[in-house]
Amino acid sequence: MREIRDVIEPGASVLVNAKIEAQDEGLRLIIDGADTIDPFAAEHIGQGLKIRVGEPAALEPLRKRIDRANDREGAVKGSIHLIVPLSDGRLAELRLPGRHAVDPAARAAVKAVAGVLEVETL
């Protein structure tokens, strides 16, 4: 168990070996082992975020939050797509250039920005 605790931490990408047992009250997940996923490999899994913004005022705070997440050591990087409203009521989807933090910690940080309506994993 100590080996698993050394590997699992919030926001970390891990590979878990587990078995599932059916019980009267539901399913039970039993973890047999865990290993970290190499950050380089995790970056190439194809992860990304699609962020739907409800108002243009959210874009600057969102940019700052993404920049802070990008600076975090060990952040898993991927593509970010923004869905923004246009003045005529239509929506535009934009892909930000480069690779940005897309791990669970980055997703939670982005989701907390006022004006962000939805964040989904690609």
Image (tube, rainbow, N blue to C red):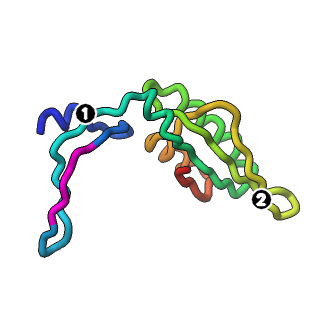
Q: Amino acid at mark 2?
A: Leu
- Of the numbered discs 2 and 1, the one sitting upstream in the chain is 1
Q: From mark 2 to mark 1, how far is it between C-alphas?
A: 41 Å
Near mark 1 (Cα within 10 A), the count class, few <14, some 14-19 or many ≥20, is some
Q: Tag on residue 7?
A: 1
Q: What residue did someone put label 2 on?
A: 91
Range of magenta residues: 16-21
Q: Residue at x 48, y 27 (%)?
A: 72
Residue 88 relative to residue 117: left or right: right
43 versus 104 height, above or below: above
Q: Horizontally, is 98 left or right of 18 in the view?
A: right
Q: Residue at image x 70%, y 33%?
A: 97
Residue found at the very far bottom of the displayed protein: 24
Residue toward you, 73 or 30: 30
Q: Amino acid at mark 1?
A: Val
**Residue depicted at x 26% and y 34%:** 35
Given contact means CB atoms under 8 Å apart, are the residues at marks 2 and 1 in contact?
no
Percent coordinates x, y for residue 36 in the rendering: 31, 32
Q: Residues within 10 Å of mark 2 (few under 14, many from 20)?
A: some
